[in-house]
């Protein structure tokens, strides 16, 4: 009962996180007349304050010393900070310039880009269904490019920056709050310097926009951190494959807002491009779930066979015919059978371990194939990466 309750709480937390990321386009226009860069700088500064308070309450500080002594991980944190800056900045600009639908496309195609990066940079091998899905996604981009009269650059920048962010986060291997704190710490000084410069030139809206506007700018830290906390609660309670399916809630809500609330145009060629993307994602999801189910079943069967063989191969007690045969220097048929069964158990155990390893790989693939934002991942506008708490989207 407690397990079901925990899983229900995890599903609720995960759905809440992705719905919040899906509805965040409603928030950024409230910050006008602030420009995208000023909003981004406030988001960096206030996010560090929020996660710093959270870490202080949780007393999670030991990771700082470990990180500072590891130049490689520091470099990866700097890369993650740089690409999430691009991702956040482009997303805010797109929303406040009437490009919510194209921004949502970036998070729809993010799983396909993540798979492509896995093949090109990590040497991963794809199944046939995955190749078909990636090819369908590429065709969708071409259709949209023809429809727009240009490549859908907003979508591509968001998808590639978020996929790169997820890769960096995966290699860093830190929790969501810790990694966000480290990334915003890297960004804090230049962001604060930019805000002070705006104030000095009289172009800052924080001091001249009134108290309500200042509160909204400060709330960017909460808008970033609250979904992240909800995602973290979900990540420890539900499988990554489930999170991968939930991650599609974010771009679905963004797409719906773009059409129904912001009244953006959807000519036939744009519908055709989105339809191809959805076909590709449906194929990825089906393939990931089917493969995960098949490997999980195989692992369970092999483990059961190995366990049964191990019981049969238990050493004979003193006084049995097998023991007498060994004492006399011979070997009874029972001993030969036990030896064969023991060998079989070892082989089955190895197979079970192989199946379990395969299952692990499939589950990882499912997280990529299916969010955030994928299901891959890492990820939603401004979230952690799925394997190590998916990256932040939006």
Image (cartoon, rainbow, N blue to C red):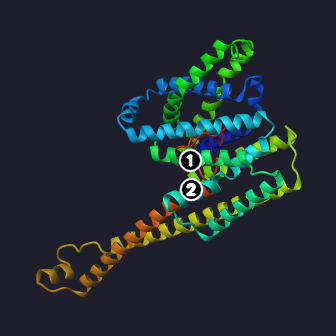
What x and y, as percent, mark residue 262? 85, 37
What x and y, as percent, mark residue 362? 53, 62
Q: In the image, is residue 5 above or below residue 355?
A: above
For the question of whether residue 131 can be seen, the reply is: yes
What x and y, as percent, mark residue 56? 47, 23
- From the image, tell me which residue sits under label 2: 117
Q: In the image, is residue 219 above or below residue 314?
A: above
Residue at 59 percent across and 38 percent down: it is: 84
Mark 2 burial class by Cα count in 10 Å: few <14, some 14-19, many 20+ = some
Q: Quadrant of residue 341?
A: bottom left
| Label 1–label 2 contact, CB within 8 A | yes
Q: Is residue 195 left or right of residue 181?
A: right
Can you tell which mark lies on residue 55? none
Q: Is residue 54 left or right of residue 379?
A: left
Residue at 29 percent across and 83 percent down: it is: 337
329 or 289: nearer the viewer: 289
Q: Quadrant location of the C terminus? A: top right
Residue at 59 percent across and 58 percent down: it is: 115
Residue at 62 percent across and 71 percent down: it is: 128
Mark 1 burial class by Cα count in 10 Å: few <14, some 14-19, many 20+ = many
363 or 260: nearer the viewer: 260
Q: Quadrant of residue 317?
A: bottom left
- From the image, tell me which residue sits under label 1: 164
For the question of whether residue 237 can be seen, the reply is: no
What x and y, as percent, mark residue 349? 37, 69
């Amino acid at each position: 009962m407690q397990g079901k309750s925990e899983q229900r709480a995890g599903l609720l937390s995960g759905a809440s996180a992705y719905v919040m990321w899906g509805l965040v386009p409603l928030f950024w226009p409230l910050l006008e007349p602030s420009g995208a860069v000023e909003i981004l700088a406030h988001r960096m500064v206030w996010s560090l304050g929020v996660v710093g308070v959270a870490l202080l309450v949780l007393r999670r500080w030991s990771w700082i010393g470990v990180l500072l002594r590891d130049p490689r991980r520091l470099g990866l944190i700097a890369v993650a900070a740089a690409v999430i800056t691009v991702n956040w900045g482009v997303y805010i600009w797109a929303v406040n310039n009437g490009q919510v639908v194209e921004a949502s496309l970036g998070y729809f195609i993010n799983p396909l880009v993540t798979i492509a990066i896995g093949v090109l940079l990590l040497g991963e091998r794809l199944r046939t269904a995955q190749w078909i899905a990636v090819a369908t996604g590429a065709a969708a981009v071409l259709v949209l490019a023809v429809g727009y009269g240009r490549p859908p650059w907003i979508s591509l920048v968001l998808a590639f920056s978020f996929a790169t962010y997820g890769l960096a986060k995966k290699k860093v291997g830190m929790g969501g709050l810790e990694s966000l704190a480290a990334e915003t710490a890297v960004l804090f000084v230049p962001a604060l310097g930019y805000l002070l410069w705006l104030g000095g030139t009289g172009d800052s809206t924080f001091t001249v926009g009134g108290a309500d506007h200042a509160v909204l700018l400060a709330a960017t830290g909460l808008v970033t951190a609250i979904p992240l906390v909800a995602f973290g609660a979900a990540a420890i309670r539900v499988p990554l494959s489930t999170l991968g399916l939930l991650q599609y809630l974010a771009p679905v809500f963004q797409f719906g807002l773009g059409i129904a609330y912001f009244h953006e145009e959807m000519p036939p060629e744009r519908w055709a491009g989105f339809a191809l993307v959805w076909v590709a994602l449906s194929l990825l999801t089906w393939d990931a779930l089917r493969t995960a189910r098949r490997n999980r079943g195989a692992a369970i069967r092999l483990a059961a066979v190995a366990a049964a063989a191990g019981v049969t191969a238990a050493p004979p007690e003193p006084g049995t015919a097998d023991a007498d045969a060994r004492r006399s220097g011979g070997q009874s048929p029972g001993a030969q059978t036990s030896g064969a069964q023991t060998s079989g158990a070892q082989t089955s155990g190895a197979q079970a371990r192989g199946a379990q390893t395969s299952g692990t790989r499939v589950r990882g693939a499912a997280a990529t194939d299916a969010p955030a934002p994928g299901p891959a991942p890492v990820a939603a506008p401004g979230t952690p990466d799925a394997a190590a708490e998916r990256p932040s989207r939006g």
